Image (tube, rainbow, N blue to C red):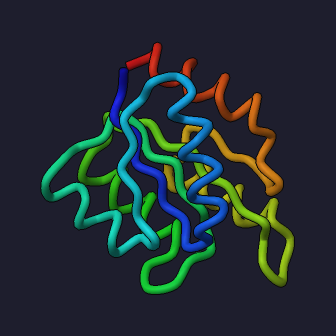
């Protein structure tokens, strides 16, 4: 069982991904934006972080960069619907910032679950 931090400002998406992660008996921490996610790291260090890219306060690209710098061992999965522009450009930036896997919305849940297991097995 791993500790997984899920970061998303959309409560429905946060709940959906939490449900998927909990299917495999992982413990979940939640944050509604990147700033809140960073405060979670002050008390607990997750094994893996799953984050949306476009969020208020501190967006996902900045969060990925900071986490990759502070905790290079943590596995990161990022996803985006792209907002007003092409989601692929955000996902390429996320890869460049250090995300281990990236997904476009709607997130393929079976594949997400599979990638979580693969990344945790690499740890």
Give residue 92's position: percent from left, percent from top: 70, 56
Residue 17 x, y percent position in the rendering: 61, 47
Please identify the quadrant where the C terminus is shown.
Answer: top left
Residue drawn at point x = 64 percent, y = 61 percent = 93
Which of the 4 quarters of the picture holds residue 31?
bottom left
Residue at 43% in and 79% down: 58
Is residue 57 positioned above or below 16 on the image?
below
Camera-nearest residue between 84 and 107: 107
The residue lying at 65 percent from left, 29 percent from top is: 113
Q: Is 15 situated above or below 63?
A: above
Q: As drawn, is 111 to the left or to the right of 101? A: right
Image vertical order of residue 57 relative to residue 61, above or below: below
Left or right? Give the position of 2 relative to 88: left
Depth check: 19 or 51 in front?
A: 19
**Left or right: where 22 falls relative to 52:** left
Q: Residue at the spot x=65%, y=64% of the render?
A: 12
Q: Quadrant of the N terminus?
A: top left
Where in the figure is residue 116, as x and y percent of width and height?
A: 56, 28
Q: Position of residue 119 (x, y in %)?
A: 51, 24
């Amino acid at each position: 069982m791993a500790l997984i931090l899920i970061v998303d400002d959309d409560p429905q998406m946060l709940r959906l991904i939490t449900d998927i992660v909990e299917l495999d008996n992982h413990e979940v921490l939640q944050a509604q934006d990147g700033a809140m996610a960073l405060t979670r790291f002050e008390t607990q260090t997750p094994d893996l972080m799953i984050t949306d890219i476009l969020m208020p306060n501190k967006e996902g690209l900045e969060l990925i960069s900071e986490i990759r710098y502070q905790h290079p061992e943590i596995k990161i999965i990022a996803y985006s619907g792209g907002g007003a522009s092409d989601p692929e450009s955000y996902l390429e930036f996320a890869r460049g910032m250090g995300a281990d896997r990236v997904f476009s919305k709607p997130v393929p849940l079976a594949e997400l679950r599979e990638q979580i297991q693969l990344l945790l097995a690499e740890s």
